[in-house]
Amino acid sequence: MTITHISAECYPIAKVGGLADVLGALPKYQNELGVTAQVVMPFYNNKFTKSHNFKPIYNDTIQLDETDYDFRILTLKDNTLGFEVFFVDVPELLYTDFVYTSDDTERFLAFQIAALDWIAQDDTVPDIIHCHDHHTGLIPFMVQESFKYNRLRRIPVAFTIHNAQYQGWFSHDLVGLIPDFKFKHVGLLDWNHVINPLAAAIKCSWIVTTVSPSYMDELKQDANGLESLLSDEHAKCIGILNGIDTEVWNPETDPLIIDNYNQETVEFGKQANKAFLCKEFNLDINKPLFAFIGRLVGQKGADLFPAIFTDALINNDISILLLGSGEKHTENELNILKHKFNTNNYNAFIGYDEKLSHIIYAGADFLLMPSRVEPCGLNQMYALKYGTVPIVNSVGGLKDTVEDIDYGGFGICHNEVSVAEVSHAITRASEFYNSEKFKQTRTEIMSIDHSWHASAQSYLNVYNSLNPFL
Ligand code: ADP
Ligand code: GLC
């Protein structure tokens, strides 16, 4: 069975968030199950593409709105990733410093059309096309409807919703950019009078998955306008929990952390990483360290962080360290907070830093995730693997992976994202830190198995349900 994943992100090539982590791991674990899984992604202008060598395997031209764009398909010369990657190089549109820009409609349309043009002309076509998020949401429609992809029409297309908040909306004025199809089917592209790539993907894919069972349920109540569509299409929708790549995320072998450790050496190991963080960020090592890592956006509850941190720091003897970037207003407020708390109990690194994130998972005592919406969330699973107790709002994948200590579990859960609720959860956590059970819990959580093995197999079962002859 050959599976072609198509995505805007893939770790370690280009990462903004968890989408990249999934695309960097799922194909590798699928390959271990004896299938051939590969990734098609854009060729960006970033650290990875600048430091690796590529080989062109195909050249062609696409036309978008009367303009011709030359493109190439590239592969990596020395690939040690565990799966093949095909890069779509449209220099004029995709070779940008950032994965996402303010002008993504044309960019990702060019990506999707070039990818399909290349796939459709090849001698062998994949058995499954698996698209991820709205940047690839027009592929299921084009495979089904665009005349020039007739050859691909019988290939089952799977689509995974990693985040339904973002849908890629654009005006019907741009419909001419999509390769010709029977115009009476234009309704498949539409949702509320605009072209909605996420909605089109849900309508046209053979199967729709999302990244946790609870998020699948929640989407029927709240999917940023697509609730009724997801309810109508529920028969082809399924939630499959993401896994974590334990070859990358393992405190025993992780080359990015200060000291490696396992369940036997967790106390010393975590202390060494915490000591590094406390020195680097001027924090008191004797206080429990609470951390946040992630995008500073409403989805993650970030707008409330300045108020939550203020309240929590006044009421508890703790330290807080944040690593993140996102909305400018929140970034500024989090920086201002550094001056308010001139004691050594708060610091923030505004930016993106992969290495620092690993050290924080290793060195923190608690990881905060007060997300309003969390389709899966990988951070809480990384935290568990590194013996760091997660504090989560019980939604989506957080609900499916973290159980509260008061109910026989191992994390701190709350059911609302407000200053009072999160601050109360932090107080509960700092009491837990001082209890006898804390050290035992952090040792135990390291052995919870969230590896990709089971989920990679679940995806293969889904593909087989689409074509039992694969
Ligand atoms: P989302 O995809 O919604 O951002 P996930 O929990 O699925 O959330 O995944 C986030 C991923 O991005 C994790 O690997 C996390 O460590 C990483 N990450 C997020 N922000 C940063 C940052 N500022 N620096 C380093 N890593 C980050
Ligand atoms: C999205 C979601 C996150 C999920 C990730 C990978 O970015 O916000 O919850 O873990 O995709 O599926």
Image (cartoon, grey):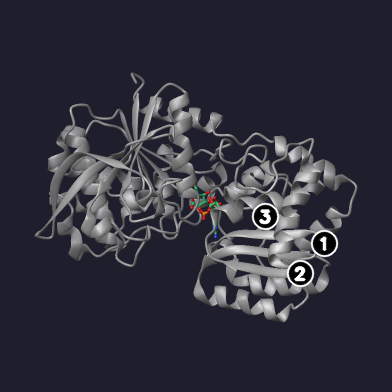
- Residue at coordinates 38% horizontally, 60% vertically from top-left? 98
Q: Quadrant of residue 371?
A: bottom right
Counting from the top left corner in percent of width and height, residue 297 is at 53, 66
- Residue 295 visible in this rendered orientation of the protein: yes
Residue sitting at x 34%, y 59%: 168
Q: Are the residues tagged 2 and 1 within 8 Å (C-beta)?
A: yes
- Disc 2 and disc 3 in contact, CB within 8 angstroms: no
Mark 2 → mark 1, Cα distance in angstroms = 8 Å
Q: Earlier in the sequence, mark 2 or mark 1?
A: 1
The residue furthest left is 66
- The residue at label 1 has a CB less than 8 Å from ligand 1: no
The residue beneath circle 2 is: 345
**Residue occupying the far top of the picture:** 469
Rendered image: mark on residue 287: 1
Q: Amino acid at mark 3?
A: Val
Quarter of the image for the N terminus: give it.
Answer: top left
Toward which corner of the image does residue 81 lie, by quadrant? top left
Residue 246 occupies quadrant: top right
Q: Point out the image quarter for the C terminus.
A: top left
The amino acid marked with disc number 1 is Lys
Foreground of the two, 57 or 336: 57
Mark 2 and mark 3: Cα distance apart in space: 21 Å
Residue at image position (71%, 81%) is: 340
Q: Which residue is mark 3?
A: 392
Q: Earlier in the sequence, mark 2 or mark 3?
A: 2
- Measured in 3D between alpha carbons, the distance from the residue under mark 3 to the one under mark 1, in whole angstroms, is 21 Å
Q: Secondary structure at mark 3?
A: strand
Say what secondary structure mark 1 lies in: loop
